Amino acid sequence: MIHSRIAGTGSHLPEKVITNFDLEKMVDTTDEWIRSRTGIERRHVAADGETTVDLAEKAARRALDAAGVAPAEVDFIAFGTTTPDLVFPNCGTLLQQRLGCRGVPAFSLETACAGFMYALSIADKYVRCGEARRALVIGAETLSRITDWSDRATAVLFADGAGAVVLEPSAAPGVLSTHLHSDGHYKDLLYCGSGVSRGFAERLAIIMAGNEVFKVAVTKLGSGVDEALAANGLERSAVDWLVPHQANIRIIQATARRLDIPMERVIVTVQDHGNTSAASVPLALDVAVRDGRIRRGDLLLLEAFGGGFTWGSALVRY
Ligand code: ACO
């Protein structure tokens, strides 16, 4: 039986940094409020003209380098994003052209912050069925483009970045299982009110009922953890590292409590990255792989929750 394994990881953050102190000058907020309610201290924001695919290309090349795979060898691209460069071609295809892997299937999918989990799940299945051998899985965003920088409720949260992994076939299991969910009943709690078919509203912005999103996120992420462990007959103690979606430190702490895992075994980047939506999990993963915390053979629990609502988890033997 063929499995898929993560052969390499990569990430990229735009150069420009906005600190909480910068935000104090832009909206009625304080560093103390942002840190205590969210855990965020700073975030990276794309420069004018810098696009989601620009960020993704850099993350992809780093992941390919780590995996020892040449860009032209990529044979499948799954790209999670809510902030595509264009209506079409999709971001996966734009990236394919830059990498020079002409003719291979490439697509993007929009499931908000769960975008990388959905892309990972699909790519895993293509590798396992033998139809892909060098799959590139991307989560990349320029959320700053749909953030209303005069709205203190959302301006303090969202940010830009990109993360990538390369999946390849393996005799031993790498990705053990993935679990995806959505529930459109919650759409009014978190959405962007503009779109091609509905039309572009005057205010292109993320609308969020933060407090209610918070409560559902904690519940769904907690049940995602239980579901992933139960599917593999594993105890909570088997997990070496929790790599959670970086939306809010209090949501991360609540999920860690559910898993009964100490915060030292949780990868936390929210203080430096803010909420980068689909990029958040692969960014956190790459940080911890490169700083040596996550090692080959470790059992990882990845999870994310986003607008829709959409959510997903994956158990991965790195
Ligand atoms: N600075 C200062 N005060 C603020 C700010 C701010 N930036 N934002 C809100 N406040 C005020 C509110 O107006 C409110 O004031 P009031 O009590 O006088 O009415 C008070 O702070 C408390 O507001 P709450 O919304 O209740 O604060 P809460 O503790 O819930 O924190 C937050 C808000 C950080 C948004 C939190 O609810 C959260 O993180 N929610 C989850 C967001 C999330 O996970 N999103 C994930 C998916 S994102 C995606 O898919 C794109």
Image (spheres, helix red, strand yellow):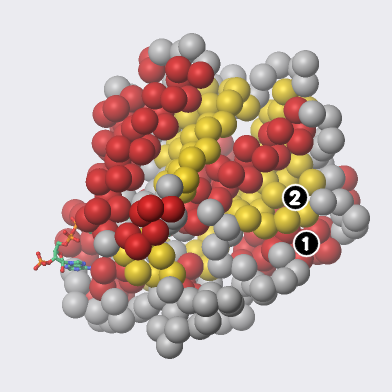
Q: Are marks 2 and 1 in contact (CB under 8 Å)?
A: yes
Q: Secondary structure at mark 1?
A: helix
Kind of residue at badge 1: Thr
Judging by the rendered image, the residue that carries numbered circle 1 is: 93
**Residue 48: image location, x then y, percent:** 56, 81
Give the Cα distance between marks 2 and 1: 8 Å
Residue 77's label in the rendered image is 2
104, 196: nearer the viewer: 196
Is the residue indicated by label 1 positioned so its CB lies within 8 Å of ligand 1? Answer: no
Q: Secondary structure at mark 2?
A: strand
Query: Which quadrant holds the N terminus?
Result: top right
Please name the residue shown 40% across and 28% down the image: 225
Question: Is residue 54 positioned above or below 134 on the image?
Answer: below
Q: Is residue 77 visible?
A: yes
In the displayed structure image, the side of residue 40 where residue 203 appears, left or right:
right
Q: Residue furthest bottom?
A: 202
Q: Residues within 10 Å of mark 2 (few under 14, many from 20)?
A: many
Ligand 1, seen in the image, is in the quarter at bottom left
Kind of residue at badge 2: Ile
Question: Who comes first in sequence, dot 2 or dot 1?
Answer: 2
In the displayed structure image, the side of residue 20 where residue 172 appears, left or right:
right
